[in-house]
Image: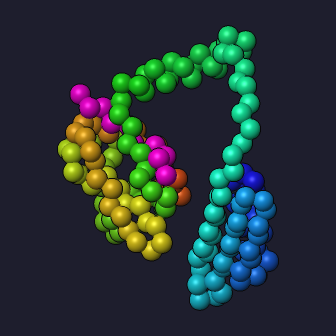
Amino acid sequence: MDIKEIQNLIKFVAKSGASEVKLEMGDIKITIKTGGEESRGETTYVQHIPVQQPVQQQASPASQPVTPAASTQETAAAEDSKYVTIKSPMIGTFYRKPSPDKPTFVEVGSTIKAGDPLCVIEAMKLFNEIESDISGKIVKILVDDSSPVEFDQPLFLVDPS
């Protein structure tokens, strides 16, 4: 089950009016809880139980044709390789501001030092301030405000020079 199917399931459950749905399919267990009128949010718990997959042989890179789109992606990747990627240390919701009425922590072009706050990730109603490990300049913000993020998902590109 991929993320699109899970998102469609959440939308379906929200529209159906059910308050809780539990689904088990092989190695995946999903519980979706939706609030009534007084609670506007929905909580989703996805538990993936690892199953050892059989080893499959990969196609050799030489057998794949090089297309202009692939070379463009390689050029962009080579350009990004000089930057340091700051990744999410946890699963949660990414926020660029400490609260809705405050300014954002950083913008593209902001100069940061080690220990400076970059964003907040909310997990289970706890707001965790994410600090920079390096000094440099923010080149790119890779996640939209109020978006869900996964563990180890890239959040920022920083030019350490």
Whether residue 67 is visible? no
Q: Is residue 156 left or right of residue 27?
A: left
Q: How is the model colour-coded?
A: rainbow
Give how far across and how far down residue 42 sits, in percent.
61, 75
Image position, residue 66 (x, y; %): 67, 12
Q: Is residue 124 left or right of residue 106?
A: right
Residue 158 belongs to magenta span: yes
Query: Residue at the spot x=59%, y=16% of the render?
Result: 71
Is residue 62 visible in this depiction of the protein? yes
Residue 99 sits in which quadrant? bottom left
Q: Is residue 49 left or right of residue 147?
A: right
Q: Is residue 143 above or below residue 64?
A: below
Q: Residue at x 50, y 23 (%)?
A: 76
In magenta, the rendered stretch is 151-161
Image location of residue 125, percent across then percent down: 45, 74
Q: Quadrant of the C terminus?
A: top left
Based on the picture, tell me whether residue 8 belongs to the magenta stretch: no
Q: What residue do we see at 35% from left, 34% from top? A: 84
User: Position of 92 compared to 56: left or right?
Assistant: left
Q: Which image quadrant: the N terminus?
A: bottom right
Q: Quadrant of residue 157?
A: top left
Q: Residue 144, how many percent across, how many down?
A: 49, 51
Figure disc tally: 0
Answer above or below: position of 77 versus 48: above
At a point 57% along the width and 23% down the height, the residue shown is 73
